[in-house]
Amino acid sequence: MEPVTDPIPSAQGMHLRRLRDLTEFEVADGNPDVRGWAVRGADGRQFGQVYELIVDAEALKVRYLDVELDETLHINERDRHILLPIGVAALDEDGDNVFVPSLTAQSVLDYPPYAEIQITREYEQAMLRALNLQLPEGEQSFYNQPGYDDSQFYQRRRLR
């Protein structure tokens, strides 16, 4: 079986895509490409690393970090990826780390796994619930909430 390279379908159409599949897109100038960076929880322990960026091609924004969980967590290989909304994480450029204060190496075990073939609205809502974030009321405002605010992600780095 060959790996899936088609766009990631969603409830709203084909607006969410892996950055590697978008040849006309790249990480914005001045922003680091965090793929390969360690992902650490509130406990400071690394529980994975950024595998890919999931982009909203219509809005030209990164919506999710695709995180590959560490083998040391003893998770089935099929369930080893999770998606994190960009606004729940923060950069530490000095150490090439991405911090997720709402998760720990233990709580990530209960996080919904990401199947790379599709991102449904139901999955997006399950992620928000797992992070104790409020569910948006309407489709128009789904990504207009703190969990998807990329300025939160880059905030620490912009304060320098």
Image (spheres, rainbow, N blue to C red):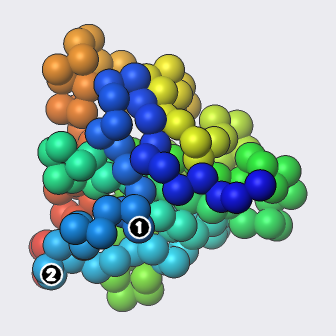
Question: Looking at the picture, does residue 27 appear above or below residue 129?
Answer: below
Disc 1 is placed on an element classified as: helix
Residue located at (26% from left, 25% from top): 142
**Tag 1 residue:** 20
Numbered disc in front, either 1 or 2: 1
Tell me which amino acid carries mark 2: Gly
Kindly indicate the quadrant of the structure image that contains residue 49: bottom right
Camera sees residue 116:
yes
Report the residue that reaches farthest toward the bottom: 94
Kindly indicate the quadrant of the structure image that contains residue 38: bottom right
Residue located at (74% from left, 47% from top): 79
Q: Is residue 144 left or right of residue 7?
A: left
Disc 2 is placed on an element classified as: loop
Q: Quadrant of the N terminus?
A: bottom right
Q: x, y (%) of residue 15?
A: 30, 39
Residue located at (22% from left, 68% from top): 24
Q: Is there CB contact under 8 Å for labels 1 and 2?
A: no
Q: Number of numbered discs present?
A: 2
Tell me the distance, in whole angstroms, between the alpha carbons under discs 1 and 2.
19 Å
**Tag 2 residue:** 30
Tell me which amino acid carries mark 1: Arg
Q: Is residue 150 left or right of residue 38?
A: left
